[in-house]
Amino acid sequence: MKQEGDRSTGPGPDAGWAGLTDHLWRFRAQYRDVRDPEKILRGALRLGMDLAGAREGCVGAIHPGSAEARLLHRTPEDGPWDRRLLSGFLRGEKVTVPPDVMLARLRRHGRMWGALAIRDADATFDWDARQAFSTIGGLANELIDQADLHRIREVRARVDRKVLEQSHPKHLSYEVLHGIRSLISYDHSAALLIHDADLGVLEVVAEQIAWRKAKGENVGRKFPLKASLHDVLAQPVVLGFDREGNGWTDWAGGGAAMLAELLDYDKVSRAGTFTPPEGAILCASLITRSGLLGVLKVASIHPGSFCQYEVDLISQFLPQAAVALQNARRTETLERRMIDAERKHAMADLARGVSHDVNNALGAVLPLVQQLLDDLETDAFDAESATADLRQVERSIRVCRRIFGGMLNFARGSTRNPSDVSPAMAVDSALVIFREGLERRGVNLIVDVPADLPPLHAVQADVEQLLLNLISNARDATGPGDSLTIRGREAAGWLVLEVEDTGSGIAPEDLAKLQEPFFTTKTNGHGLGVAICRSIAAQLRGQLAIDSVLGEGTRVRVSFPIDEGREGP
């Protein structure tokens, strides 16, 4: 669309345009490695203002569904600009551009999205000046396209690194969502849903909410997948939908508007919260050789936010993401089997460890019961003595019940549903099993885990197994007169749990190998305990560190992030 007034003539300050080619060459050399689009645009605007001798400039952009353009940058910062003029220009409307203003359209992601604008009240810009200014805008577009391609390569490389690191599926899922966020400008949400073929459902395993910069609250929700929709998703497709009234229209040609209805699962806001409705949805199937793995959903608030560019981009990105997620899930399955095997082995170890405690408790009960029976049969029953004996029997039975109850809870803790786990309560549950044995061995137990520590969002059984393994190792390394200390604290956005003993310690040559699977210093050990602890900590984005001095003791510290994106303390 031509701008009215484009053929205006006048003496405007266009002498600088004579060396345009050289200026463009230098600009390209200066910004060809810049990856920040806004920095490129500010540089292009500054170049245009310098060559034109203009005093004012701005970069405007328009979002689908917005009535007016927004100003990304302006010089001076308080300079007034006609946003309706910019909006009409970007929408391709016939607008009258004042003679002292020049505009250059900016295309990105396959659509018109922004404009460079300069103004000089004392100038009248002619046709040649306007064409030269448009050339600057074109070069800015080219450099931004290069930056976008570089960003795509970076995202793919980042996912590759996570695969090589054998990341947990949950971590890899969020890495995929982070990558999509950096590639596609969505302003509502994105989610990964995994297909459960046995149940015939899609389950949300990862979700990010862009409009409030948080993780979603829909993780764990399941949605039945009809056979007709499964057939659509069973092929590698990327579908696009826009809201139209109360329904959805399919603009990508998939003919599956019912899928948008299924994925529009936040139609009703939760009590006390505001959730903006989704106006546009992209839905992409994750396909592997085994069939449908899951679905990627990306949503924006305004209809028309997505176009063929996003469809093509996701189509290129998803095959790699699907294979990576499938491999990660296979690794998770093997890891889960290893943890289950370790749980069974730990049960046997616990049974051996508490057998003395149970035997002592029951050994005290039997003679007391026999004495009570003899007193009754010989008419020597004394109520006061019998009361004291029964209280001792009650204490011994409570000890047995406490020990067996703790072991049963550990054995039954197989549910895989994450919940908020109190560190203090998890420590108490583990000590139910060990407390009697530690006291019998003469080990001084010190517990300093405040009840108000932030909870861990984790599987309860995993946290308890982590603590049981660490406390069990500390118990085996201690003897009469030693101490075993369990601490919990919050430090700089991290929840830190420590298990420390003053026992035998670990030799330096063994300490370096301790976290390797199947390495053990115990006669009857199997070498999986510490490796399992490290795996459980990694699932929660935690870190495990071991410090030990031979003959002095060992300290194991496990740190869990309370805030995302921090490094360990």
Image (cartoon, rainbow, N blue to C red):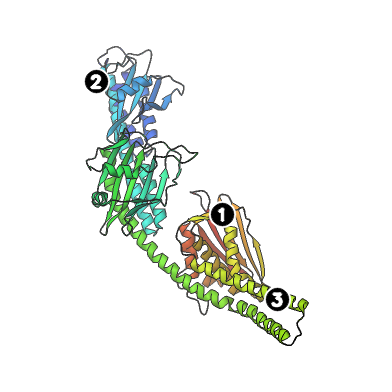
Mark 1 lies on residue:
495
**Element assignment for label 1:** strand
In the rendered view, does 452 fall on the left or right side of 73? right
Is the C-beta separation of discs 2 and 1 under 8 Å? no
What separation in Å lies between label 1 and label 3 (alpha carbons)?
44 Å
Rate crowding at label 1 as few (under 14), some (14 to 19) or many (20 or more) other CA atoms within 10 Å. Answer: many
Which mark is on residue 13?
none
Residue at the location (27% across, 47% down)? 316
Q: Amino acid at mark 1?
A: Leu
Q: Amino acid at mark 2?
A: Lys
Pointer 3 or 2: first along the chain: 2
**Element assignment for label 2:** loop
Q: Position of residue 78 (x, y in %)?
A: 46, 21
The answer to whether any part of residue 485 appears in the image is: yes
Is the C-beta separation of discs 1 and 3 under 8 Å? no
Rate crowding at label 2 as few (under 14), some (14 to 19) or many (20 or more) other CA atoms within 10 Å. Answer: few
Pointer 2 or 1: first along the chain: 2
Q: Position of residue 197 (x, y in %)?
A: 31, 58
- Looking at the image, residue 114 lies above or below residue 33: above
**Element assignment for label 3:** helix
Which mark is on residue 2?
2
Quadrant (top left/top right/bottom left/bottom right) for the C terminus: bottom right
Which mark is on residue 390?
3
Q: Position of residue 74 (x, y in %)?
A: 42, 25
The answer to whether any part of residue 514 appears in the image is: no
Q: Amino acid at mark 3?
A: Leu
